[in-house]
Image (spheres, rainbow, N blue to C red):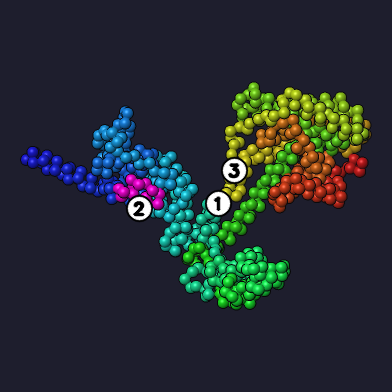
Amino acid sequence: MLRLFFAGLAILCACLTANAQETGLQPILQEHQEIIAKSSRKTIKPAIDAIAASGLPQAQVMLETWAAKDMWMRKSDGLFFAGKKIEGRSYELTDFDTSEVVGTFEKSDLKQLKPNSGVRAMIGTALVQFQLTDPNRAKRLEALKSIQRDPDGALLVPVRASIDNEPDAYLKAQKQRLERLLTIGYDEDIAARVAAIEEMSDDLGVDVRAALNPLVVTTRKAATELPSDVNVALVLEPGSDTLPRAEAYDLLVANDLAGSRMSPGDIRTALAANIDGGRVAGTPVAQLNTDAGRTEAYNALAEAGSVPALVTEADIDAALGAHVFFETYTEPSAEVTAAAEKALEEIELKVGLNQMLDLMLDAISLGSIYFLAAIGLAITFGVMGVINMAHGEFIMMGAYTGYVVQQFVPDHTLSIIVAIPMAFVVTFAMGVAMERLVIRWLYARPLETLLATFGISIALQQLAKNIFGTQARPLTAPGWLDGAWVLNDVVSISYIRIAIFVLALTFLGLFLYIIKRSRLGLEMRAVTQNPRMAGSMGINPGRVNMLTFGLGSGIAGIAGVAIGLFAKVTSDLGSDYIVQSFMTVVVGGVGNIWGALAGAGMIGFLQKGIEWMNPSNTLAAQTYMIAFIIIFIQFRPRGIIALKGRAAGD
């Protein structure tokens, strides 16, 4: 009995093995042996489709082997195997269905299959459906990216089938989104396509618009009557702005519905070809020096049947009247095109609103940068009345301080934490030194102050070039500031700009506290209101001016660290911000922190708005902005928030 059982089991296994071989991959390969061996892009598609449609697990290995040019055909029987070079010209062949080595053969007994780039691309498309369910997450992700790069209707079913069993939440969401996009473009069910379009109409992704736009593409056509079997988008009237008369007739000519018009050059060529004895149709060549003469001679040739007749205006009118002109959608379904147009209108409106939001975020970001750059200047200019043309160089010094700190502190987060107070200390000390050595001797002499600080500006730039050279130095932001906060495909803002905005708000709060709550702030306000009265009350205006100038310079240094995180750190860094800093102070209101904030916001929004209207010419945008500010100052010379007190009238 036991012997009978084992014998039956052996027979069963043999039958199963034979059945597997009959239904395996090799029969499919043999069915398409000729076109596989040829591996031509024009003929290979049925073979690849059959292999992919088999659903056999070994089909993925076979396709990957083929794409890698490691598939060989045995010449003796035409069977296909995976080949591996052993030594010399010998190759070890492995069966695709059983994964067993079938032997070693000489290269002369084999034919290597080398698919060209076109065939490999088709193999790659076929592999996607296997890779969508591959245990390796990286392969599944790569398959999704491959489909997104080159969508194909044949991949819709595999994508759908792979969704339910996808264990990764992110990949599952991506597959669901991709399935909706493929449904829009390739599903045979009209209702399913319309439902997918309506579902994705709230999505602002570029890929959604890329899927919808081909559905509303139109082609301009002409016919003797309006066809009933096409999706007509618009009926056109010849001679209208949409379809000028000449374009309408050219469309008829292009569709072989009317004869071509002869240009003056064509008429001359035809006349030259029919010169006989110095005459053309009996007219001497010498008399063909006018358009009327040439036309008359050409008509004579046409009557004789030598050339085609000229198309007259009456002929054109008759041809236009006998035909109908229209635009048809490439997409045959009217329901799909209607849904696509409605979705695109909704998306366009939402994109416009989001672009406005993105523009506002950019303007706020730019305004915060200008505020940081100008806040120190607002304090010194407001309290002391000093036009400091070297303010930009304090920004530059702060940026270089951050660079130097990073040379000793390699940790970028720690280096920025150290660089901010270090930049303040360095530029504060330089500001105090500058005020004590130069500025204090030039109070109430604005022209001399301007010239002196301008000279100091040039000297500091040259000093920076001598120390650091002319090449830009990197001030690297911490890794957690890399990237951007992305709301959707339209709205995003970099983390560095968000950090600068937060820094600007922090300094706004800090200086409001200093001015409103500290003794130095009280003395600053007193000197701003009336320096003589403040002096008579025991306040030392010279000391206040020194500390104020140092404080403003220190803030400029901190601004330099922030700006250096996204701008090139060079000796000319401050020059890029000095003009905007002065504009911010003057427009906002001299000597007022809230005014500096308002001025920075106004200039930021103004500059971004002008750049949006004229994006191709940033120089023109700067010019328009300066012109607007000049006009603004004419009507409000004290700025948005005017200084109050006796000093305001000085």
Q: Which amino acid does label 2 sit on?
A: Pro
Q: Mark 1 points at which residue?
A: 206
Q: Name the residue under label 3.
A: 485
Q: Which mark is residue 46?
A: 2
Mark nearer the N terminus (2 vs 1): 2
Left or right of 128? Residue 214 is right
Mark closer to the observer (3, 1): 1
User: Where on the picture, by quarter, is residue 3?
Assistant: top left
Residue 556 in percent (x, y) is at: 76, 33
Q: Residue at x 68, y 40 (%)?
A: 501
Answer whether residue 35 is magenta in the image. Answer: yes
Mark nearer the N terminus (3 vs 1): 1
Mark 1, secondary structure of its residue:
helix
Do callouts 2 and 1 mark residues in contact (Cβ within 8 Å)?
Answer: no
Alpha carbon of mark 3 to alpha carbon of mark 1: how far?
18 Å
Q: What stretch is highlighted in magenta?
A: 32-45
Residue nearer the viewer, 290 or 325? 290
User: Where on the picture, by quarter, is residue 449?
Assistant: top right
Residue positioned most to the top: 408
Mark nearer the N terminus (2 vs 3): 2
Residue 27 in percent (x, y) is at: 26, 48
Q: What residue type is labelled 3?
A: Trp
Task: Work out whether residue 515 can be spotted.
Answer: no
